[in-house]
Image (tube, rainbow, N blue to C red):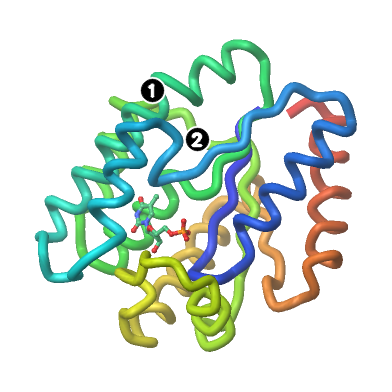
């Protein structure tokens, strides 16, 4: 089972993915928790390149290819082996982020991004995606309070973040069976409880 978390900046994905990981481990499952961009030494290097420093340092195409390069390495050396070993893989962001940030918001062709996914994962998409939806004003405030040096996207203007939010909601509406959209402004425990209930039902029906 391949599970992803998606959402805008400060939507609580990282916290919720860790809580889901802890829950599934307690339930006795073999679980891998990972993130994008990242999850391998090479992909973590790419993360540093794309998420720190000056936004204008690279073109959208260059940035896109870097995210895809990171994903190719992550998929073949971490995600696929774990899925093949029957583990549950929880990934904080995946292809949907590329479709939204680079595709819908920055104009990279969707066909190109989907073709890249076919090369990377044989077109394998997540089985379940939790979209944590939050008003950018709230999310950005939270993201800034994390105080790391990954300011690249968080510095972009509100209109961009509104576009990101709308993009994710559009993807979720197009694939209601894969996505569960949750209100990311609710307390952590409330969101966690909904995810636990959902994953329990999803695992019970074997998918
Ligand atoms: P996060 O790990 O805090 O969610 O931040 C990762 C940032 O990388 C976030 O701004 C979204 C961005 N991103 C893309 O633009 N495209 C992608 O394909 C991925 C995986 C992330």
Q: Is residue 84 above or below residue 49?
A: above
Q: Residue 197 appears at what percent x and percent y?
A: 88, 49
| Residue under numbered circle 2 | 125
Q: Which percent across, then down, holds residue 89?
A: 62, 31
Q: Circles 1 and 2: CB distance less than 8 Å?
A: no
Q: Which mark is residue 195?
A: none
Q: CA distance from mark 1 to mark 2?
A: 9 Å
Kindly identify the residue that appears in the image at 61 percent across and 55 percent down: 14
Residue placed farthest to the top in the image? 85
- Disc on res. 122: 1
Viewed as shown, does residue 30 lie left or right of 39? right
The answer to whether residue 103 is seen in the rendering is no
Quadrant of picture, ligand 1: bottom left
Quadrant position of the C terminus in the picture? top right
Residue at x-position 76% and y-position 45%: 20
Q: Name the residue located 25 percent from the left edge and 55 percent from the top edge.
A: 50
Q: Is residue 110 visible?
A: yes
Q: Is residue 12 left or right of residue 192?
A: left
Q: Please state the horizontal and vertical placement of residue 155, each as a whole percent of the image.
A: 33, 79
What residue is rendered at 54% in x and 78% in y?
145
Task: Where is residue 88? Give x, y as percent.
Answer: 68, 27
Mark 1, ligand 1, within 8 Å: the answer is no
Residue 12: image quadrant is bottom right
Q: Is residue 196 above or below residue 104?
A: above
């Amino acid at each position: 089972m391949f599970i992803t978390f998606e959402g805008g900046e400060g939507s609580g994905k990282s916290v919720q993915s860790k809580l889901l990981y802890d829950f599934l481990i307690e339930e006795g499952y073999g679980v891998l928790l990972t993130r994008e961009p990242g999850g391998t030494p090479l992909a973590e290097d790419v993360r540093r390149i794309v998420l720190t420093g000056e936004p204008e340092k690279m073109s959208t195409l260059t940035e896109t290819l870097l995210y895809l390069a990171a994903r190719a390495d992550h998929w073949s050396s971490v995600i696929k082996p774990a899925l093949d070993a029957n583990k549950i893989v929880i990934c904080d962001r995946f292809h949907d982020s590329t479709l939204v940030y680079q595709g819908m918001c920055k104009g990279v062709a969707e066909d190109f991004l989907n073709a890249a996914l076919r090369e990377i994962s044989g077109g394998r998409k997540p089985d379940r995606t939790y979209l944590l939806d939050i008003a950018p004003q709230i999310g950005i405030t939270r993201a800034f309070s994390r105080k790391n040096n990954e300011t690249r996207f968080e510095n972009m203007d509100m209109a961009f973040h509104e576009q990101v939010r709308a993009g994710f909601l559009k993807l979720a509406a197009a694939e209601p069976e894969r996505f569960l959209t949750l209100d990311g402004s609710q307390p952590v425990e409330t969101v966690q409880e909904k995810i636990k209930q959902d994953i329990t039902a999803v695992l019970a029906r074997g998918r």
